[in-house]
Image (tube, helix red, strand yellow):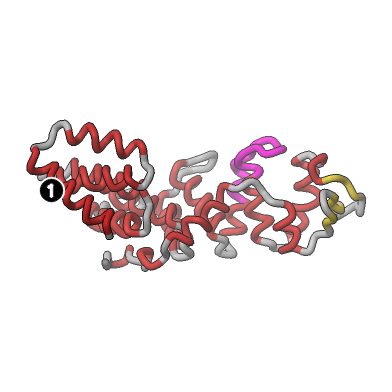
Amino acid sequence: MVFGEYNIGICRIGFAAVLMTAVASAVPNMHALAQTTGAQTTGAQTTGAQSGETKPWKTLSGEEQIRRFYLPRAQAGDATAQYYLGHMYQNGLGVKADKQAAAEWFGRAADQDDPRALYRLAVMLQTGDGIPKAPSRALALYRRAAEQGVLEAYFNMAQMIERGEGVAANPSAAEGMFEQLADAGMTEAMRELGRINARKQDPDLPAAWFWFAFAAANGDSQAGELARLLAASMSEEDLAAGQTRLGKSLNN
């Protein structure tokens, strides 16, 4: 499927991208980051970047982790450390939450095309989370993250394009993007397609029910309830059409 400027080949990404983007919400893993940046670690011990003092990692406060470990590497240009600093400041992990600082560090990592930082900063800019809203910039950052396989970024792009946030509204293009995401296995996109088909000027109830039911078959309980509610208002013929389509999809 091709949708003009919005098509970035997302349908070719597959499920591996979904697993990769789970890192975006993970609690910082000191050992993995240390391997990347060359920090000195031995078991549960960590050596302070400035003082040389060795202390158990779990005993360090969030401020000490930042001062001894993350900040020196972030200031040296390490995008992973910059991302984790943003994560800690945004969520108040061991430090006082500071959305401005979070946006600054996400921005530095985003300048190096870190997909996690691109996505997180885009969300902040779209929603105005502690910083002024900037939908056009958010859309651009989502696109850069999506080009690296972040399906959630492509999903948010589709929602913005459907609603006309930061760009002229294009519901048809957005629907095509949701279809690509549904093909990649994203149940949230399947649910969106159910909503879109149910609310069209000329509703396509068999398609709406199919997408809700297909999402439910893939583990989305909310979509299952929507399929049940919709079925109660459908004709037998429309419901049968949706069920036939579902059966074919599940058997493929």
Residue 33 is situated, as x and y percent measured from the top left of the image, at 71, 57
In the image, residue 204 sits, relative to residue 108, either above or below, namely above
Magenta stretch contains residue 85: no
Q: Quadrant of the N terminus?
A: bottom left
- Which image quadrant is residue 233 in? top left
Horizontal side, residue 166 vs residue 71: left or right: left
Residue 128 is situated, as x and y percent measured from the top left of the image, at 48, 41
Residue 49 is situated, as x and y percent measured from the top left of the image, at 84, 55
In the image, residue 223 sits, relative to residue 30, either above or below, namely above
Q: Is residue 201 visible?
A: no
Residue 180 is situated, as x and y percent measured from the top left of the image, at 32, 60
Q: Which residue type does callout 1 highlight?
A: Ala
Q: Is residue 219 visible?
A: yes
In the image, the segment drawn in magenta is: 88-104
Q: Between residues 10 and 185, which one lies in front from this camera angle? A: 185
Horizontal side, residue 46 vs residue 200: left or right: right
- Disc 1 residue crowd, few under 14, some 14–19, many 20+, Cα 10 Å: some
